[in-house]
């Protein structure tokens, strides 16, 4: 039996039924972010969580090291094509293999890796709806033995326009056809709550579509499509607009971009460096309430 993904989002039921398919690759992308004393965030690899228990056969995809740019002073920035291809190959992901990605803790890490794969020309990937928390809450199988897919050859062809830089955000701010979207919490957007990334508040003129508003708070699955559409439309990020999405470091933004993809709307772009770059630039416009 070989697996064929039904779409960019797969259910726990689908994954359980297809888990033994020899061509399927399952990746655990868990990372934890913790508030820091300076008001920012510290990061922690989810390797310990993976070692304590993961979906059978899954391998651990480390977004804190192998799958980020080791030359960048910023966290989680997109690696080079060669670095990404080598990491995917070590994880057993070949060009013709369906991939399902999940995470524990925040759901955003699955969409982040999904979007990274798209940025390098790979589209045969899906996110597990509800992630590890839904899987484990349903009492589904787990194991502690590390996964061991055979190494594979992964072709990385970088695609422009999936992730964008600061200049693209500036251009979008003055474009009547575009909307700059903040995926952080309403309190962070207002500048009244943390964590922050050097300056509290938001990119001037941006609207708020929080990543958390994409999910059912009970099981962390994505909300129905009509509800997702309402979340975007209420903020002014309507279907005809070009969306440029940011957050603190491009992670929550990836979840909102993934939700936009589920709606079948124009592909959103993600400001990869997000506020960890923007907020530290004194010339970059920011505003806060109050």
Image (spheres, grey):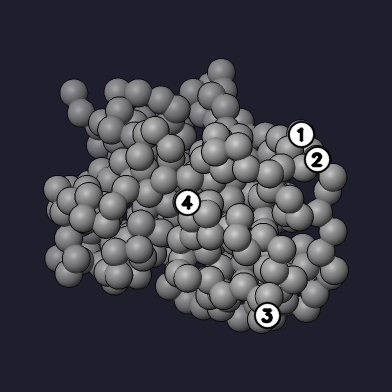
Can I make out residue 235 in this image? yes
| Mark 1 residue crowding within 10 angstroms, few (<14) / some (14–19) / many (20+) | few
Q: Is residue 223 above or below residue 22?
A: above
Q: Is residue 156 above or below residue 281?
A: below
Q: Are marks 3 and 4 in contact (CB under 8 Å)?
A: no
Contact between labelled residues 3 and 1, with CB atoms less than 8 Å apart: no
Quarter of the image where one finds residue 210: top left
Q: Are marks 3 and 2 in contact (CB under 8 Å)?
A: no
Task: Give coordinates of residue 176: x percent, y percent.
Answer: 15, 65
Q: Which residue is mark 4?
A: 129
Query: Is residue 249 visible to us here?
Result: no
Which residue is drawn at the image coordinates 49% and 23% (left, top)?
39
Q: Are the two marked residues, 1 and 2, in contact with CB atoms closer than 8 angstroms?
A: yes
Identify the residue at horizontal 36%, vertical 65% (top origin).
Answer: 261
Q: CA distance from mark 3 to mark 2?
A: 27 Å
Q: Give the residue at mark 1.
A: 52
Horizontal side of residue 54 vs 271, given as left or right = right
Q: Which residue is mark 3?
A: 95
The image quadrant where one finds the N terminus is bottom right
Q: Identify the residue under disc 2.
A: 144
Of 92 and 241, the residue lying toward us: 92
Q: CA distance from mark 1 to mark 2?
A: 6 Å
Q: Earlier in the sequence, mark 1 or mark 3?
A: 1
Local SS, label 4: loop
Q: Is residue 205 left or right of residue 250?
A: left
Q: Mark 3 against mark 2, which lies toward the viewer?
A: 2
Q: Residues within 10 Å of mark 4 (few under 14, many from 20)?
A: many
User: Which sits earlier in the primary sequence, circle 3 or circle 2?
Assistant: 3
Task: Name the residue rendered at 43%, 51% in the picture.
Answer: 255
Marks 2/4: CA distance?
Answer: 22 Å
The C terminus sits in image quarter: top left
Q: Nearer the viewer, mark 1 or mark 3?
A: 1
């Amino acid at each position: 039996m070989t697996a064929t993904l039904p779409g960019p989002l797969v259910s726990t039921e689908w994954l359980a039924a297809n888990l033994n398919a020899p061509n399927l690759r399952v990746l655990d992308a868990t990372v934890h972010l913790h508030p820091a004393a300076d008001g920012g965030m510290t990061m922690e690899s989810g390797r310990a969580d993976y070692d304590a228990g993961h979906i059978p056969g899954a391998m651990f995809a480390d977004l804190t090291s192998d799958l980020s740019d080791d030359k960048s002073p910023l966290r989680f920035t997109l690696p080079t094509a060669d670095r990404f291809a080598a990491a995917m190959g070590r994880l057993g992901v070949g060009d013709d293999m369906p991939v399902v990605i999940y995470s524990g803790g925040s759901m955003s890490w699955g969409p982040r890796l999904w979007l990274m794969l798209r940025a390098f020309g790979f589209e045969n990937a899906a996110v597990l709806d509800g992630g590890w928390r839904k899987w484990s809450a349903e009492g589904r199988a787990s194991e502690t033995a590390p996964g061991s897919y055979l190494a594979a050859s992964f072709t990385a062809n970088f695609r422009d326009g999936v992730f964008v830089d600061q200049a693209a955000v500036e251009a979008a701010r003055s474009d009547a056809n575009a909307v700059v979207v903040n995926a952080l919490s309403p309190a962070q957007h207002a500048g009244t709550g943390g964590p922050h990334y050097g300056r509290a508040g938001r990119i001037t003129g941006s609207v708020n579509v929080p990543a958390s508003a994409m999910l059912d708070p009970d099981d962390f699955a994505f909300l129905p499509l009509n509800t997702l559409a309402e979340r975007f439309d209420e903020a002014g990020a309507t279907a005809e607009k070009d969306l440029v999405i940011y957050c603190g470091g491009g992670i929550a933004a990836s979840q909102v971009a993934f939700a936009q993809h589920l709606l079948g709307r124009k592909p959103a772009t993600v400001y990869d460096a997000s506020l960890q770059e923007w907020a530290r630039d004194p010339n970059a416009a920011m505003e806060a309430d109050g």
